[in-house]
Image (cartoon, rainbow, N blue to C red):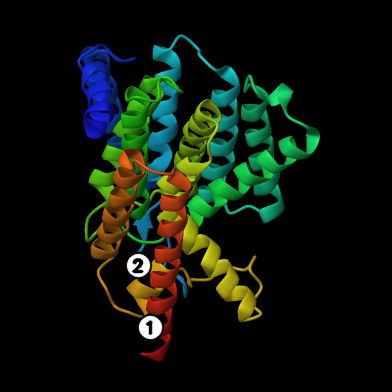
Amino acid sequence: MYLYSRIYPLWGTCKEKTALTATAIAITFSALALAEALYLYIARKAGIAAGVEARSSHRRPVVSGGGVVFYFAMAAWWIWSGGADPSFFLGCSLVAFISFVDDVHPLSVEARLLIQFLGVIVAFAGCPYAATLSPPAVGAAILFGVGFINGWNFMDGINGMCAGYTLLTLCTLLVIDLGCYGTFVDPGLLECGIMAAAVLAWCNFRRRALCFAGDVGSLTSAFIVLYALSRLMISTGSIMWLGLVAVYGVDVTLTIVHRIILQQNIFRPHRMHLYELLANEGGHSHLRISACYIALQAAINTGLYLWPGNPYIYLGAVLAILSAIYIAVVRRLYKG
């Protein structure tokens, strides 16, 4: 009966018309695929590519910035929605713009952070709950937002990771949006993001990637996830939904802790995330690592949605298990 109560609302809603009609979805997906193909052609001609560096996990230059398709998707959603939530779209535009510029011509950290903060502030200002929060809470929310999108960016280092993980996260958020918790964000926004992730996955989730997401891809997709996830947490009054990004969160957090223990400058580039160690030091396939991360997160998401008991007990257990796995694997790699 419990599973029925969780699944039936989703089934009933899916049979109804969502934000985008089938025609709109077909047009949007075709347009995004065409725009991505056109971008790849232009980028090759213009030499917009990620070179091979000491900390790279690839061995040949690859077109960068293919994740611009996420911004195209948000522009399509904004048009279909009749200009809904302009503060979110403006904030997303700022983050996408500065990230794409950085992909083409590297900028200073200060310049990037300045526009990222501005983008998060603009989007947050449009939130109907922003005015009810105290100044310290507002500051904490903005700092969390900037940290979240940069943490998401840190995890974009091997083929398939950004596209696949973003696709899973947005699909999960859409399931929740259509399920028993009620609509917390326009389903069309999530649908457009899912289509962008699918297009990028086609180009990137392969042994020889056609393109990398670039900062414009990882940061823009992070901004979309951050927006939807924040709306979900506000709507339900619960932070348990952070479990939807637990695998990323544990890798980013414990890598920072690891580097602090090693007395390293955490603001300098590195390749010490667990997935990077598995790919570079461990010699494992990019696609296998990405698939494992995505599958593990998918299992966690399913449990979080269907868990009948206290969700915080579930979340605590998940974080403890992920942390134990991280520590055990890192120790084994360093001993090897």
Q: Is residue 163 above or below residue 39?
A: below
Residue 88, image x, y percentages: 56, 25
Residue holding disc 2: 58
**Residue 294 vertical placement versus 131 (above, below):** below
Image coords of residue 181 (percent x, y): 40, 25
Q: Earlier in the sequence, mark 2 or mark 1?
A: 2
Q: Residue at x 27, y 73 (%)?
A: 284
Which structural element holds mark 2? Answer: loop
On the question of residue 262 being in view, the answer is yes
| Front in this rendered view, residue 127 or 28 | 127
Question: What amino acid is labelled 2 in the image?
Answer: His
Residue 196 visible somewhere in the drawing: no
Instruction: Report whether 66 appears left or right of 295.
Output: right
Q: Is residue 82 left or right of residue 87?
A: left
* Label 1 SS: helix
Tell me the crowding category of disc 2: few under 14, some 14 to 19, or many 20 or more residues within 10 angstroms, Cα based: many
Q: Quadrant of the C terminus?
A: bottom left
Residue at (54%, 24%) from the top-left corner? Answer: 89
Dots 2, 1 in contact, CB < 8 A: no
Looking at the rendering, which quadrant does residue 37 occupy?
Answer: top left
Labelled disc at residue 333: 1
Up the image or down, 233 lies above or below 284; here it is: above
Q: Position of residue 270 (x, y in %)?
A: 53, 71
Q: Residues within 10 Å of mark 1 (few under 14, many from 20)?
A: few
Please indicate whether residue 91 sits to the left or right of residue 192 in the image.
right
Q: Residue at x 24, y 29 (%)?
A: 7
Q: Where is residue 147 drawn, in percent x and y?
A: 61, 50
